[in-house]
Image (cartoon, grey):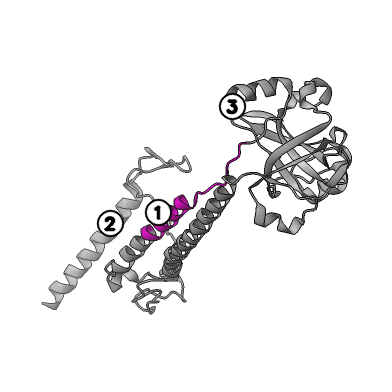
Amino acid sequence: MNNSFSSLRQAIRSSSKNELKFYNSSYKPQWRHRCSQCLRRQPFSLKRTLRQKSSPADDPSFQSIVDAPAQLVRSGQKHNAGIIILALIPITAFCLGTWQIQRLYWKTDLIARFEDRLIRPPLPLPPQIDPTAIQDFDYRRVYATGRLRHDKEMLIGPRLHDGNDGYLVITPLERTGQDGKQKGSTILVSRGWIPKKMKSQRLRSPESLAEGEVTVQGLLREPWKKNFFTPDNSPEKGAWYFPDVHEMAAWAGTEPIWIEETMRPDLMESYRREEKGIPIGRAAEVNLRNNHTQYIFTWYSLSLATSVMMWMVLKKPPKGVRERVRRSKEW
């Protein structure tokens, strides 16, 4: 029995040696394959060796996501600071709308008082006027008699009238009495608008430069204020961009009293005056803008819209905790 096993073992050893010897001597690889990377021929029967890529698992300090504790970034938080900003918008818009209601009442009452003064008969302008009392007589119809000082004329502009460029003519009025002597202070009269081409007095009709004693009827007014984009006046250059009553009075040597000459609205008369360079006076009416009703609608609409948006955000069902948790960037 033992002899048979030993003989079988020797036969297997001899056969394996013969096969190895045959492989080394008789096998010849066929060089039919060419590598696409290095362009070297390789036997088709041999497999290409693949580069082994580095794996994070080869790093001794590697830690699996299974072993690393999860980092909780956000959980159970329904709203953030943005809801506070969203809540301030409707509150602020509601307050502004309420403020515009108060402004509407104030502007409506102001226009009513001015219109009440317009229907009253014109008042003769007293010889001496307190400039601080002008506000109580704003839009009051008055008249004054005197001589126009065309040599101290001032042009405020550019000013538009029906889409045309031009200037406002400001002329000092030396008031006189029945005897022709000066009586009362000298005031500033806004005579009206002239086109730009009639800027020079030599181009105007003599009718526009009235000589002798004249009677001016108009409105006792507080002129408009300068806005942010209006440049400063330059009296030394004769450039006036807005009616600064005190500055103009100091330059012309008059009292800081401003009267706007009025005329009855007439289209044909306006065309005639424009062609001859005669100042076109303003109409005796209140021209204050009253847009507060539009502002009320705008602010209250914004308040309502943002309130609905905030209600939708608050009533929106919260997402599940699993959806509100973001994974750590280190995973």
Q: Is residue 40 above or below residue 58?
A: above
Q: Are marks 3 and 2 in contact (CB under 8 Å)?
A: no
The residue shown at (39%, 78%) is 68
Check disc 1 and report its element: helix, strand or loop: loop
- Image check: 227 left or right of 65? right
Q: What secondary structure is marked by label 2? A: helix
The amino acid marked with disc number 1 is Leu
Residue found 35% across the figure and 44% down from its top = 28
Please give the range of residues in magenta. Answer: 283-305
Q: Within the magenta stretch, is there residue 244?
A: no
Q: Please identify, in this view, whether the residue under mark 1 or under mark 2 is nearer the observer.
A: 1
Q: On the image, numbered disc 3 is attached to which residue?
A: 266
Viewer-side residue, 331 vs 216: 216
**Quadrant that contains the C terminus:** bottom left
Numbered-mark total: 3
* Classed neighbour count for the residue bearing mark 1: other residues with Cα under 10 Å, few (<14), some (14–19), many (≥20): few
Mark 1 or mark 2: which comes first in sequence? 2
Screen quadrant of the N terminus? bottom left
Q: Nearer the viewer, mark 1 or mark 3?
A: 3
Contact, mark 1 vs mark 2 (Cβ under 8 Å): no
Q: Is 30 on the left-hand or right-hand side of 198? A: left
